[in-house]
Image: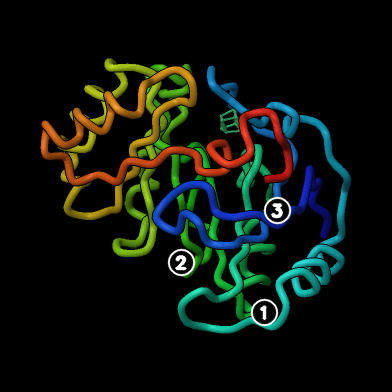
Amino acid sequence: MQLKVNEVFHSIQGEGARIGRPCLFIRLTGCPLRCTYCDTAYAFTEGTPRELPDLLDEVCRRLGPPRKGPNAPFVELTGGEPLAHPSAPALLRAQLDLGYEVALETAGSHDLRPVPREVIKIVDRKTPGSGEEHRWLESNLDHMVSGQDELKFVLCDEADYAWAKAWCAERGIWERLEVLFSPVWGKLDPAWLAERIVADGLPVRLQVQLHKVIWGVARKGV
Ligand code: SF4
């Protein structure tokens, strides 16, 4: 079983509820979407085919022995769009079976049913500003685990904020899932977003991309 891998790198988790934790990232090649703000276009085509056992060996070598509990070794599958690979669920299952804490970053455009329930799913709900709003698979909401998975909105502008707020309210999302609001880097002012969240009393988590705060926007492999 092969997967085309763009890069494997150790860094800190730059986004989401587990922000700041050391994490091993596996970035798969390819994505059928073309978001207006995409910062990983280099992963659309660049990559090397890897056999699954070879990839798992590297995960074990770089993460060390698996362990449960706080600050356990942590691996995240990202992209591109990882679920565009038919073998991605098998890789996730194998990492869980090794005993690691496993996360998946996905655009919400592909069916989540093949993804093991225990995988922490960070699912992007693409907004109108992304240009890919229509790719959303609404049934994916039924396969997200309350208290574990996260629904992320990357917001381009004030219109995206209003849209995301209404979309969550219509579906009672606040009561079910951890919601992340993230401003597009360099486009939407994080201070404006923070003030709107507080003023509107929204139960969401504001996040900026910590890896860009630390290393800037141009650096790959972080
Ligand atoms: S889904 Fe992610 S990788 Fe694909 S185009 Fe959008 S931002 Fe880029």
Tag 3, which secondary structure? strand
Residue at the spot of label 3 = 26
Q: Is residue 130 left or right of residue 222?
A: left
Report if the beta carbon of the residue with label 3 is closer than 8 angstroms to ligand 1.
no
Rounded to the nearest angstrom, the CA distance separating label 1 from label 3 is 16 Å
Q: Return the residue at label 1.
A: 98
Residue at position x 83%, y 71% from top?
57
Q: Return the x and y of residue 199 as percentages of the image width and height.
A: 11, 32
Indicate the amino acid at tag 1: Leu
Question: Quick one: SS at disc 1?
Answer: helix
> Marks 3 and 2, how far apart in space?
19 Å
Residue under the image location 63 percent in, 78 percent down: 97
**Residue type marked 2:** Arg
| Mark 1 / mark 2, whichever is N-terminal | 1
Q: Is residue 199 left or right of residue 129?
A: left
Question: Which quadrant of the figure has residue 38?
Answer: top right
Badge 1 local density, few (<14 within 10 Å), some, or many (20+)?
some
Spatial separation of the CA atoms under disc 1 and disc 2: 16 Å
